[in-house]
Image: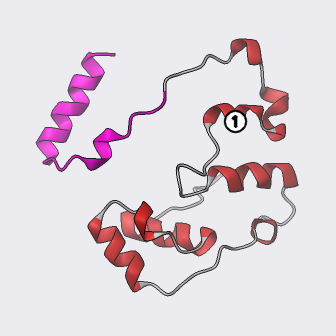
Amino acid sequence: GKPLFPGTDHLDQLHRIMLLCGKIELSLVRSREARDYVTSLPKREKKDFKDVFKGANPVAIDLLEKMLEFDINQRITAEEALKHPYMAQYSEPSDEPDSDSFDQAFEDFDLTCEEWKEHVWNEIQNM
């Protein structure tokens, strides 16, 4: 396979996502640079995934659409994805442990590259 959104940088990748998924709600974009970029673009409508992925399994398309929802509050969770009909053949409920919710607090950190490296190193050390 190949990447669905092979952007050359974060803004190009955001542009490619919006070409498929439609213009993103500004309140969901944390980066000021990305917000300014999204504002500068014309309104884009979400493409019909059935047309874009013509010939693909409709159940797979349904799962993909749910996974590519930009709004984290609307996006399918890992637990829900494992229960999705497309994943049924791979599912083994007795061997699918639960986990704590992912902590995204780091998204609001304004750190230097060296500070990020230190945080990542500390995280690795504490695993």
Is residue 91 left or right of 27 when viewed as pictured?
Answer: right
Q: Determine if residue 9 is in view.
A: no
Is residue 101 left or right of 94 when viewed as pictured?
Answer: left
Q: Is residue 113 above or below residue 118?
A: below
Which residue is at 69% across, 36% downward? Answer: 80
In this view of the protein, which residue sits in the foreground, 3 or 112? 112
- Secondary structure predominantly adopted by residues drawn in magenta: helix
How busy is the neighbourhood of tag 1: few (under 14 within 10 Å), some, or many (20 plus)? few
Q: Give residue 51's position: percent from left, percent from top.
A: 80, 72
In this view of the protein, which residue sits in the foreground, 100 or 126? 100
Q: Which residue is mark 1?
A: 80
Q: Give residue 1's position: percent from left, percent from top.
A: 66, 51
* Label 1 residue SS: helix
Q: Quadrant of the C terminus?
A: top left
Residue 18: quarter of image: bottom right
Residues in magenta, as a range: 101-127
Which residue is at 59% across, 73% downward? Answer: 22
Q: Is residue 48 above or below residue 117?
A: below
